[in-house]
Amino acid sequence: MIERLQQRFSRHPHITREELLGFYRSFEPDLKDSTFAWRLYSLKAKNLLMPVKKGVYSFSPKPQFHPKVEPKLRAIAIKLTKQFPSARICVWSTQWLNDWMIHQPGRFLLLVEAEAAATEAAFYFLKDEHYKNLFLTPDENTIERYIFEERESIIVKSLITKAPIDKEKKIATPSLEKILVDLFVDQKLFSTFQGSELQHIYNTLYSKYALNITRMTAYAKRRTKDEELIDFMSKNTLFSELFIR
């Protein structure tokens, strides 16, 4: 049955729940909803079906993104995890964006995000560890006058509750969904990645990697920017095909 399913939908970039149900009922007209739900669960568990958004799936899932956490960033993460074992912390670098951009920036940010209660403590801990070009939740003036003057800066900021993060060899990193939303929302901090660059990044990632749109919009909602994000994606990016349904 899986082979028939693959043959039927091999050229479909996305499949709806109704299309899948129609396929199964073409062979089993009396198929119960509970049995169908179990089959969906089984396909997802076997990584044969990838959720894209509510009621929409991809039958030929694109690869997951696995960032290469550079030694300096890895060392920061390990030190912070050891110092604050119960705190939720994730790290990433804007250098990861290079492969998805039109122009290559000469300056990079190392992002250290810690849950609100640990943010300030994480900053002073890294300061005591003698890390340079270190900034705590910088305002627009600091970003323009100091951060943009350095080749590499470390930004310590609060991690939004329930932000989607992944683990890369025991190092917590933001999911691609989180990175995309943050680039859209934090326009001052990520000014290098706005305009045509942002569209290019969104389109490249949409074409290359598996992304969960529900995960994106849920996180954007926590940042009170879900409607703006959906409007941007539906009007300016390849994501638009997901909002036509």
Image: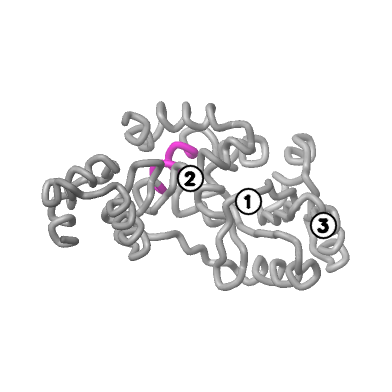
Q: Is residue 113 left or right of residue 195?
A: right
Q: Is residue 88 left or right of residue 208?
A: right
Residue under numbered circle 1: 107
Three-letter residue code for mark 1: Arg
Between disc 1 and disc 3, whose residue precedes?
Answer: 1
Mark 3 or 2: in front is 3
Total count of labels: 3
Q: CA distance from mark 3 to mark 2?
A: 31 Å
Residue under numbered circle 2: 103
Mark 1 or 3: in front is 3
Tag of residue 34: none
Q: Is residue 224 above or below residue 163?
A: above
33 vs 68, nearest the viewer: 33
| Range covered by the magenta-colored residues | 197-205
Tag of residue 123: 3
Magenta stretch: helix, strand or loop mostly: helix
Q: CA distance from mark 1 to mark 2?
A: 12 Å
Q: Is residue 12 left or right of residue 147?
A: left
- x and y, in percent, of residue 127 in the image: 85, 61
Residue at point 28% right, 54% down? 35
Q: Is residue 225 left or right of residue 153?
A: left
Between disc 3 and disc 2, whose residue precedes?
Answer: 2
- Considering the image in quadrants, where does the C terminus appear? top left
